[in-house]
Image (cartoon, rainbow, N blue to C red):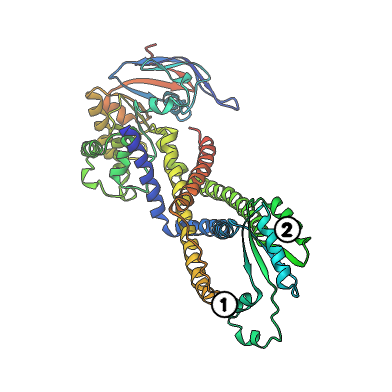
Amino acid sequence: MISFSHVTKRFPGGHQALQDVSFSIDAGELVFVTGHSGAGKSTLLKLLVAIERPTSGNIVVNGQNIGKLSRRGVPFMRRNFGLVFQDHKLLFDRNVFNNVALPLQISGFPGKDVARRVRAALDKVGLLKLESAMPITLSGGEQQRLCIARAIVHRPAILLADEPTSNLDHEYALEIGELIRSFNQVGVTAIIATHDQALMDQLTPRVISLRQGVIETGVTA
Amino acid sequence: MKGWLAAHAGGLGAALRRIGVAPLGSALNALVIGIALSLPVGLYLIVANLQTASRELTVTPQVSVFMALDANRAEVAQVEARLKKHTQISTYRLVPRDQALADLKKSSGLTDVIDGLPQNPLPDAFIIDAADVAPATLAALRDEIAQWPRVAHVQLDAQWALRLDAGLRFARLVATVLATLLGVALAAITFNTIRLQVLTRRDEIEVIKLIGATDSFIKRPFLYFGALQGTAGGAVAWLIVAAGTYLANLSLGELSHVYAALFQLRPLSLIEGLALLLTPAALGWFGAWLSVSRHLALIER
């Protein structure tokens, strides 16, 4: 489903974020990308959704070569993904319901389907009662769950999470871990960039470990 | 098609919400645009009104022939005979000097002054409708009749109207130039407004780009905002011009009493009004499109 072959990413200025990285991920897998800060975890996720383009090598997702995708093709490719951000990236000028509705509105879902799906997603993350609250009034854990609801509301094939538990208490982190596990159990491919050892112990995923832009262990090239 | 409509309805809704969030700022913007637009539109309306009036007057340009004050009946009859034979004259009418004085007394209300005159100051006159009303032919006719014996003065009644018409054409040009300049200004104002909006919504734009929004999805609310702002400005201009026309007609009504002639400004027609709404809308859309395209490219993600 996802394959990196000999991917290198060099930033302007000469910083080498990834070097000759190759691996592949099958549909339905749960994969953690680990490593210290600056090891290239975030870069790897950014390459997956074409926020950055590889300097060399190929990234193929669902048969599409991400690195060679046209500008116009990028938004449609991104709709295959659900993105969970470390800093949530919620929109604070609208309520919980409308934050979750955003991906559906972007893809042009009809109004009544939107409401049904948004409530289903909010129910899933336990925020159904807060649908008309403003995000600023939510706790850190609730904000992260809201971010997850927004990521899965359009039922993406792949869930990408960048440090989803790094700002959370242990208990909240466990909840997030359970949520990720439940999506993975219904067939969603999940790729999590993290250095949260507790989360790893909880979910026992396959691990791709990066050190200074190079893969250390867990390679299935 | 249904999805396309829904997408545009969504864009329009988002634009309306943005106006709703800052109603005062939006109203002031519309006011500025409206006041600016009302200048050329008002000028245009005045020109259009005067042009209609002058055209009515110039439909049948007449030639007035004034005899010498001391011309006697036989001499007047001689001129009349020549007019009758002249091929380029379709009809003519003799206004005897006594009748002219009586008419003047009746219409001007200057009875006392006229009664006090030692003698009738008016000459006998002919009012001629020419067969061919081309300005050149009329001028030739005037020059010819002026040579006849005992003819004191020949006047083309249409001449002032022709001069007025030339003046109005100039005023119309001024209105057009003004409208063009202010149209450019409108697009520029919108460009700037949208630039600020894009910058303040930078985070939101980055997020919705990340979750798969196309450029058109992001642009649509901005484009509708530009178009709505232009339309609102056009509506304000329409109101200003309508109010101006109403007030002008009130005072023209008083003038009409004095001059015993009715001259009223017509308001903007429905078509002109719609053009006044749609043209700024298109300009606003264009300014917004330029701005959002340019500034979105700077938020490349």
Instruction: Look at the picture and state if B149 lies above or below B211.
Output: below
Instruction: Look at the picture and state if B280 lies above or below A152.
Output: below
Query: Mark 2 to mark 1: distance in Å?
Result: 28 Å
| Residue annotated with mark 1 | B107
Q: In the depicted view, which residue is nearer to us: B150 or A130? A: B150
Q: In the depicted view, which residue is nearer to us: B29 or B170? A: B170
Residue B188 is left or right of residue B225, and the answer is right
Q: Is residue B135 among what the camera can see? A: yes
| Residue annotated with mark 2 | B142
**Which residue is at 54% across, 40% downward?**
B290
Instruction: Look at the picture and state if B84 lies above or below A59.
Output: below
Dot 2: what SS? helix
Expressed as whole percent of the image width and height from the top left, the position of residue A17 reads 51, 24
Marked residue chain, label 2: B
- N-terminal of the pair, mark 2 or mark 1, is 1
Dot 1: what SS? helix
Residue A175 is left or right of residue A36, and the answer is left
- Say which quarter of the image contains residue B151: bottom right
